[in-house]
């Protein structure tokens, strides 16, 4: 919880606390600054033309934590994370609770890209995000997505700054969450939120079926589907491995020179997940994809007529991916669609 001493270093809060108690200014659960006053603080900084960088932090899939473990554990994680984040930010700035599972960071002296990049990288590497929380015999791995913009470099007013921060946050979510996006005009200026929406599960399955029905060439089906799924799920690679252990980049159906051994993989419910680069490289075919710099993989077997006929692999360069039900469902469905195609070709 923030103290009077910590907040009174800032003129806005020093004046505010002359007539209001500290508890009135802080969020009652987390002890960081409440939504109203962190927003007013930002407006005051802009009014006084004080340079700063602002980030919105959205905890990934936090609703699932509440739904699966209950609000007691959910509240504990919110409080613990807020403490970790505010401690990490320290003298560099302030943290507020923007609402629900969203937090706001305001930091000073880091408007240039290199400094703020290192700052956000440290949030993920120094046990703030990507952290295991153990409470009431539950082990919960928490990640978050960060969208960031700077005043006055990226926007000259309050509304513009929030619009850009929201845009970069949404971009991070579409990229798969568990990451940070710093606004770069050359990359993000023309990015529109309405264009960032990816298709829902039902639409993706419908489109997979449409592709299988519209082409006669097996390779053409796989390449078209691969490009579509990679774009929707923000994947870096999709591999198709056939009965003879031939290793293909599915988007091009290029045969890759890979010496692989998948027989030793232990699947759980037809699924194999690895989320860390070190684990991926230790896998039986880890060296085969090392050159592709994959750090997270999702794998399933292809079973036409209940016979093992190959594998399907989703891959990401980004480590510590929390694979969600949507990605798993699409992997399994696509594998079954390929299995049916192979069975019909016999």
Image: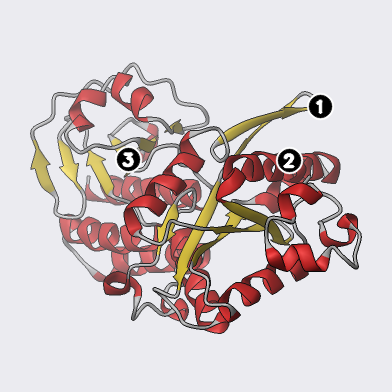
Q: Kindly indicate whether the residue at mark 1 contacts the one at mark 3 (C-beta within 8 angstroms).
A: no
Neighbor class of circle 3 (other Cα within 10 Å; few <14, some 14-19, many 20+) is many
Q: Earlier in the sequence, mark 3 or mark 1?
A: 1
Label 3, label 1: how far apart the Cα atoms are:
36 Å
Q: Kindly indicate whether the residue at mark 2 contacts the one at mark 3 (C-beta within 8 angstroms).
A: no
- Residue at horizontal 9 percent and vertical 42 percent from the top: 255
Residue hosting label 2: 77
Residue hosting label 3: 313
Mark 2, mark 1: which one is toward the viewer? 2
In the image, is 253 to the left or to the right of 107? Answer: left
Among the 4 quarters of the image, the one containing residue 80: top right
Above/below status of 45 relative to 303: below
Label 2, label 1: how far apart the Cα atoms are:
12 Å
Percent across and percent down for residue 155 are 45, 79
Q: Secondary structure at mark 2?
A: helix
Between residues 117 and 221, which one lies in front from this camera angle?
A: 117
**Residue at the limit of the structure toward the top, as seen here:** 264
Between residues 21 and 32, which one lies in front from this camera angle?
A: 21
Q: Secondary structure at mark 3?
A: strand
- Residue at horizontal 35 percent and vertical 38 percent from the top: 302
Quadrant for the N terminus, please: top right
Q: How is the image coloured?
A: secondary structure
Between residues 305 and 251, which one lies in front from this camera angle?
A: 251
Q: Residue 136 bears which disc, if any?
A: 1
In the image, is 145 to the left or to the right of 171? Answer: right
- Residue at horizontal 46 percent and vertical 32 percent from the top: 270
Q: Earlier in the sequence, mark 2 or mark 1?
A: 2
Percent across and percent down for residue 254 are 10, 47
Residue 31 shows in the view:
no
Percent across and percent down for residue 330 are 44, 52
């Amino acid at each position: 919880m923030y103290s009077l001493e910590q907040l009174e270093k800032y003129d806005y809060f020093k004046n505010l606390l002359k007539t209001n108690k500290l508890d009135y200014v802080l969020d009652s659960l987390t002890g960081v600054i409440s939504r109203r006053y962190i927003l007013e603080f930002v407006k005051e900084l802009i009014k006084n033309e004080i340079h700063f960088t602002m980030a919105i932090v959205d905890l990934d899939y936090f609703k699932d934590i509440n739904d699966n473990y209950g609000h007691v554990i959910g509240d504990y994680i919110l409080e613990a994370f807020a403490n970790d984040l505010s401690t990490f930010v320290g003298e560099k700035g302030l943290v507020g609770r923007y609402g629900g599972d969203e937090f706001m960071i305001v930091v000073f002296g880091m408007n240039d890209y290199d400094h703020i990049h290192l700052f956000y990288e440290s949030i993920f590497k120094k046990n703030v995000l990507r952290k295991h929380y153990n409470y009431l015999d539950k082990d919960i791995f928490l990640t978050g997505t960060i969208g960031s913009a700077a005043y006055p470099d990226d926007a000259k007013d309050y509304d513009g700054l929030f619009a850009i921060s929201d845009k970069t946050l949404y971009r991070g979510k579409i990229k798969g969450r568990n990451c940070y996006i710093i606004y770069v005009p050359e990359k993000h200026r023309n990015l529109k939120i309405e264009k960032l929406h990816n298709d829902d599960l039902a639409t993706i399955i419908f489109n997979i079926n449409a592709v299988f029905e519209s082409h006669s060439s097996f390779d053409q089906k796989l390449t078209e589907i691969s490009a579509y799924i990679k774009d929707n799920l923000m994947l870096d690679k999709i591999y198709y491995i056939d009965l003879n252990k031939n290793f293909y980049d599915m988007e091009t159906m290029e045969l890759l020179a890979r010496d692989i051994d998948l027989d030793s993989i232990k699947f759980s419910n037809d699924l194999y997940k690895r989320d860390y680069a070190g684990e991926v490289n230790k896998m039986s075919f880890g060296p085969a994809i090392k050159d592709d710099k994959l750090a997270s993989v999702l794998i399933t077997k292809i079973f036409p007529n209940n016979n093992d006929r190959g594998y399907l692999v989703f891959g990401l360069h980004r480590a510590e991916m929390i694979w969600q039900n949507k990605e798993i469902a699409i992997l399994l469905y696509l594998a079954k669609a390929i299995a049916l195609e192979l069975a019909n070709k016999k």
